[in-house]
Every structure is written in C-alpha cells, then in structure tokens.
C-alpha cells in the first residue's frame, strides 16, 4: 500500500512539473510590427520584401526572399514582435519595363 501511495504522489508531483504551453505574447497588431521591423529585415541580403500571412490559423510575419540560403536563415530571427517568421522564396522580382 505504501508503494502505491508513493507512486501516486510521485505521479502527481511530476504532473505539476509538466511543461505548460505558453502562448507567444504579441508586441502589437501585425501591421504595426511589419511597419516597425521591415526596414531592419530589408537590410538582410536576399530579402526582397515582407508581408503578413497565415499558417495553421495564426498570423505570421512573412519574409519574401529571392532564394533561401544558410546565411539568410542565420540572420533571420524565428519570431519578430511575437509573430513566427516564415520565409517564402519568390525568386528574382523586377519592375516591368516602361
């Protein structure tokens, strides 16, 4: 009986130590985060734009790049302003001739 009681107490103690799913706190609405952080992101070589998007029902900070490289991945944070950063490769983009 002592063994069962000890096991139950241990299980309860461990359940209290389980990781808690922590929601990321958003700095501001995504439009404001984009306006604030786009200039610094645009200085990263290979980045050609930013925007907002949605993945798995969550708003994300989209970084448009001409190609994905290890250097780009090293320089981009995983989150900006509390929003997950998602890289979308769009290739080379240029304005049409006038």
Image: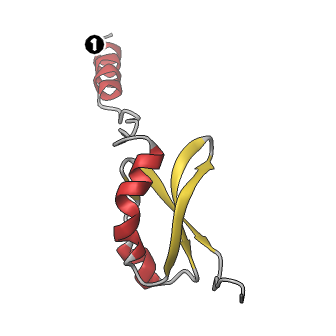
Which colouring convention does the figure follow? Answer: secondary structure
Residue situated furthest front in the rendering: 98
- Residue 20 lies left or right of residue 62; in this view the side is left
In this rendering, the answer to whether 89 lies above or below 23 is below
- Residue 95 lies left or right of residue 51; in this view the side is right
Identify the secondary structure beneath mark 1.
Answer: helix
In this rendering, the answer to whether 23 lies above or below 75 is above
Q: Quadrant of the C terminus?
A: bottom right
Q: Quadrant of the N terminus?
A: top left
Q: Residues within 10 Å of mark 1 (few under 14, many from 20)?
A: few
Image x and y of residue 94, in percent: 64, 85
Residue at 41% from the left image edge and 56% from the top image edge: 35
Residue situated furthest bottom in the rendering: 97
Image x and y of residue 6, in percent: 28, 18
Q: Report the number of numbered marks.
A: 1
Image x and y of residue 48, in percent: 52, 77
In this rendering, the answer to whether 61 lies above or below 12 is below
Residue at 52% from the left image edge and 70% from the top image edge: 49
Residue situated furthest top in the rendering: 1
Q: Quadrant of residue 18?
A: top left
- Residue 9 lies left or right of residue 69; in this view the side is left
Seen from the viewer's position, the closer of residues 94 and 47 is 94
Residue at 28% from the left image edge and 13% from the top image edge: 2
In this rendering, the answer to whether 31 lies above or below 42 is above
Image x and y of residue 93, in percent: 64, 82
Residue at 33% from the left image edge and 21% from the top image edge: 7
Residue that carries the numbered disc 1 in the rendered image: 2
Seen from the viewer's position, the closer of residues 10 and 16 is 16
């Amino acid at each position: 009986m002592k063994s069962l009681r000890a096991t139950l107490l241990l299980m309860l103690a461990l359940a209290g130590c389980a990781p808690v799913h922590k929601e990321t706190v958003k700095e501001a609405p995504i439009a404001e985060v984009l306006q604030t952080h786009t200039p610094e992101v645009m200085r990263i070589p290979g980045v050609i734009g930013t925007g907002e998007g949605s993945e798995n029902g969550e708003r994300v900070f989209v970084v448009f790049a001409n190609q994905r490289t290890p250097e780009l991945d090293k320089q981009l944070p995983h989150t900006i302003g509390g929003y997950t950063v998602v890289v979308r490769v769009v290739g080379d983009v240029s304005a049409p001739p006038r």
